[in-house]
Image (tube, rainbow, N blue to C red):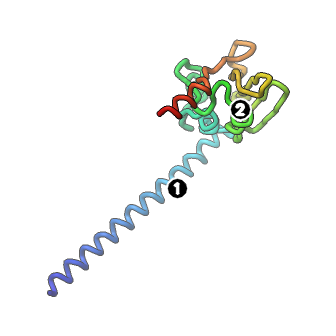
């Protein structure tokens, strides 16, 4: 009987120790992430690449340099998943809540993020029914006067696919 009690005691202490270790590991991961974000603020004092990635619905880590960040945004493989052609204006504009500067005009809206190398702007163009038609990425390093048009999926196709599944 004494041996059985001792075994249960050792087993419960072991489980408790594992719980404490896992909790400490999670806390250190959270602390490490916060410290990493603080370090990223030295490189990116205004906006973080993560802010832009969240708005578009793509993955872009904070630790990449600005040139790599721009290369990934302007690559042909970068498809925004949060934005779709023909989606309502309010839904499209809601994606850019983290933008530092937001300007809405009659047929388009501009959302700006500040980086050390200049302002990165997304210009969303809408039709007369306030549905998203096009989105352009603008920065001073981009040579095209209108910027680069980002590819968008069609909103109707997306909703038809999701309702038929």
- First in residue order: circle 1 vs circle 2: 1
Nearest to the observer: residue 33 or residue 3: 3
Query: 10 Å neighbourhood of mark 1: few (<14), some, or many (≥20)?
Result: few
Which of pointers 1 and 2 indicates the residue nearer the eye? Answer: 2
Alpha carbon separation for disc pair 1 and 2: 39 Å
Residue closest to the far top: 144
Q: Position of residue 57 (x, y in %)?
A: 58, 34
Query: Residue at coordinates 60% horizontally, 20% vertically from top-left?
Result: 151
Q: Position of residue 83 (x, y in %)?
A: 63, 30
Element type where label 1 sits in the image: helix
Q: Position of residue 55 (x, y in %)?
A: 64, 36
Residue closest to the far right: 106
Residue 91 found in image quarter = top right
Which residue is label 2 attached to? Answer: 88
Element type where label 2 sits in the image: loop
Q: Does residue 41 lie above or below 143 as drawn?
A: below
> Do the CB atoms of the residues marked 1 and 2 lie less than 8 Å apart?
no
Query: Residue at coordinates 63% horizontally, 21% vertically from top-left?
Result: 150
Query: Residue at coordinates 85% horizontally, 26% vertically from top-left?
Result: 106
Give the quarter of the figure containing the N terminus: bottom left
Q: Position of residue 109 (x, y in %)?
A: 78, 29
Query: 10 Å neighbourhood of mark 2: few (<14), some, or many (≥20)?
Result: some
Nearest to the observer: residue 84 or residue 136: 84
Which residue is label 1 attached to? Answer: 31
Residue 58 found in image quarter = top right
Residue closest to the far front: 164
Query: Residue at coordinates 60% horizontally, 42% vertically from top-left?
Result: 40
Can I make out residue 43 in this image?
no
Left or right of 144, for residue 161:
left
Can I make out residue 23 in this image?
yes
Tag shown at residue 51: none
């Amino acid at each position: 009987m004494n041996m059985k009690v001792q075994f249960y005691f050792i087993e419960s202490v072991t489980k408790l120790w594992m719980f404490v270790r896992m909790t400490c590991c999670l806390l250190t991961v959270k602390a490490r992430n916060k410290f990493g974000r603080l370090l990223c603020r030295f490189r990116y004092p205004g906006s973080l690449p993560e802010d832009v990635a969240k708005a578009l619905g793509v993955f872009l880590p904070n630790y990449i340099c600005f040139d790599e960040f721009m290369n990934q945004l302007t690559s042909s493989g970068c498809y925004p998943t949060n934005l779709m052609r023909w989606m309502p204006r309010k839904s499209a504009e809601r994606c850019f809540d983290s933008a530092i500067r937001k300007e809405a005009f009659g047929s388009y809206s501009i959302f700006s993020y500040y980086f050390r190398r200049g302002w990165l702007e997304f210009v969303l163009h809408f039709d007369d029914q306030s549905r998203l038609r096009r989105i352009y990425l603008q920065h001073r390093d981009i040579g095209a006067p209108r910027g680069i048009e980002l590819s968008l999926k069609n909103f109707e196709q997306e909703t038809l696919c999701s309702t038929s599944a």
